[in-house]
Image: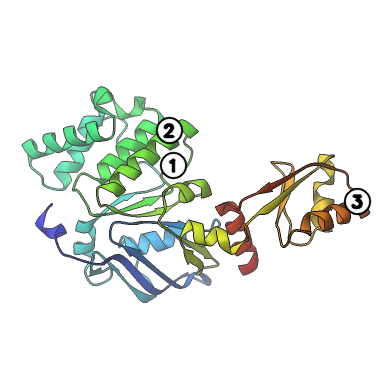
Amino acid sequence: MNAIHSRPFTDAIRARGLTKSFGANRVLAGVDLTVPTGSLLALLGPNGSGKTTTVRILTTLLAPDGGTATVGGHDVTRDGVAVRRMIGLTSQQATVDDLLTGRENLELFAGLYHLGRRRARRRADELLERFGLTAAAGRRAGTYSGGMRRRLDLAASMVSEPPILFLDEPTTGLDPRSRAELWSVIRELLASGTTILLTTQYLEEADQLADRVVVINGGRVVADDSPAALKRQVGAERLALRPAEPADLARAGAALPGAHPDAEAGELTLALQDPDHLRRALDQLHRAGIPVGHVELRTPTLDDVFFELTAAAA
């Protein structure tokens, strides 16, 4: 590891009381988060909740209005150069050059880090193999599939072997196969000791990868715990009900307080309060004149956690 990366630190990322406003719009209202070294923290929240703003502050792309943050033991406002030497960043939009080959893209990034020509070639070869791109190394990046481009972008962020990696919605727009391939790469990075802060729109992604999950809503942290602990908070089981007639979904939601309608799935879910809750729910729907086509008991998911927390904090 490069000497500049060798400084020991227990918490790779620490933020306390981060605030940020754009004009009259307050985006962050006192965000606290901690990412222990070698772990993966998933940052979740609705659109506009402040996820990307938090990442931009932690990667020195944006100055906070208030609060403090350290990355790799360095203050993000006073030691921005040192922070940037410690981190890699994969943003929502791929940063690779479509006109260059995969190998040329990686050698370009290596040059920006002043690795030298010979070391740049060697590092490019290592990353092409690690990210499964060796066979496509001589092809222009513009011919790559979406999944290959994201892997190349992630490889570029790892050129300098940073101990801390920020992934801002890295799998958005990828098909399920490409997403699973990228998950495998992220797990390998985590296993090698890389600390990762991940923002994502996919709650299953956080459930699969994260050691801890922080949920932001309205610029504030509304939850911070392991995926398993968060799921326990919303109950042992969820009740899923599907009306016999899809047009009755809204009425069914109104008849069952606390239910979350899902128009795409044509069903609604609610926390199971006690063993008699199913009977009471069916009775309520019967009294409302809504026939039920399907009933299912499910263990809670991060989707349930997300709906519960963001609804409660809205």
- Going by the numbered disc 2, the residue's amino acid type is Ser
Residue at label 3? 286
Mark 2 vs mark 1, CA separation in Å: 8 Å
Residue at label 1? 171
Residue occupying the point 14% across, 60% down: 6
Disc 2 packing (10 Å; few <14; some 14–19; many ≥20): some
Which element carries disc 2, helix, strand or loop? helix
- Going by the numbered disc 1, the residue's amino acid type is Thr
The answer, for residue 175, to whether it is visible in the render is: no
Quadrant including the C terminus: bottom right
Contact between marks 2 and 1 (CB within 8 A): the answer is yes
- Going by the numbered disc 3, the residue's amino acid type is His
**Residue 245 image point, x, y percent:** 84, 39
Q: Which of 222 and 280 lies nearest the eye of the viewer?
A: 280
Which element carries disc 3, helix, strand or loop? helix
**Residue 228 image point, x, y percent:** 50, 57
Residue at label 2? 178
Is 76 left or right of 253, judged from the image as shown? Answer: left
Q: Which of 188 and 28 lies nearest the eye of the viewer?
A: 188
Disc 1 packing (10 Å; few <14; some 14–19; many ≥20): many
Mark 3 vs mark 1, CA separation in Å: 43 Å
- The extreme front residue here reads 275
Residue occupying the point 20% across, 44% down: 159
